[in-house]
Amino acid sequence: FVVLSAWCGDRFMPTVARGRMSYQHPTHLKAMVEAGYTSKDSAQWNVTPTQIPNEECLLLQEATPQSCLLAVERLAWNEAPKYFMYPRKISSWNSNPTF
């Protein structure tokens, strides 16, 4: 986790932890903040997930290195930072994490 956070930045892991309330991710996010793994500001930054387009979803689901790379290269990265989610999970996004 330390290497992933160092490479992706302090917002990456708490953003992922906000993503799925049905998997108790808000509980995990709160624990990350309390443990000092991430800051409250990073956990609560103002972000709305961007839906992964259907073609790219299908490529990611092939789960080969080539198809995943192609899918990621096709995503619209021009307006950083972005957090991409599969369409089926966007409705479970925690838009207001509280502590």
Image (cartoon, helix red, strand yellow):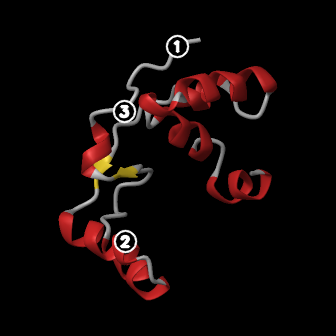
Element class at badge 1 = loop
Q: Position of residue 16 (x, y in %)?
A: 52, 43
| Amino acid identity at mark 3 | Trp
In the rendered image, which quarter is residue 34 located in? Answer: top right
Element class at badge 2 = helix
The residue pinned by badge 1 equals 98
Q: Earlier in the sequence, mark 2 or mark 1?
A: 2
Q: In the image, is residue 51 above or below residue 65?
A: above
Q: Position of residue 95 (x, y in %)?
A: 38, 25
The image's mark for residue 93 is 3
Residue lying furthest front: 23
2 or 1: mark nearer the eye? 2
The residue shown at (58%, 46%) is 12
In the rendered image, which quarter is residue 89 located in? Answer: top left
Element class at badge 3 = loop
Q: Disc 3 and disc 1: Cα gap in Å?
A: 13 Å
| Amino acid identity at mark 2 | Leu
The residue shown at (63%, 29%) is 28
Is residue 25 shown left or right of residue 40? Answer: left
The residue pinned by badge 2 equals 60
Q: In the image, is residue 40 above or below residue 57?
A: above
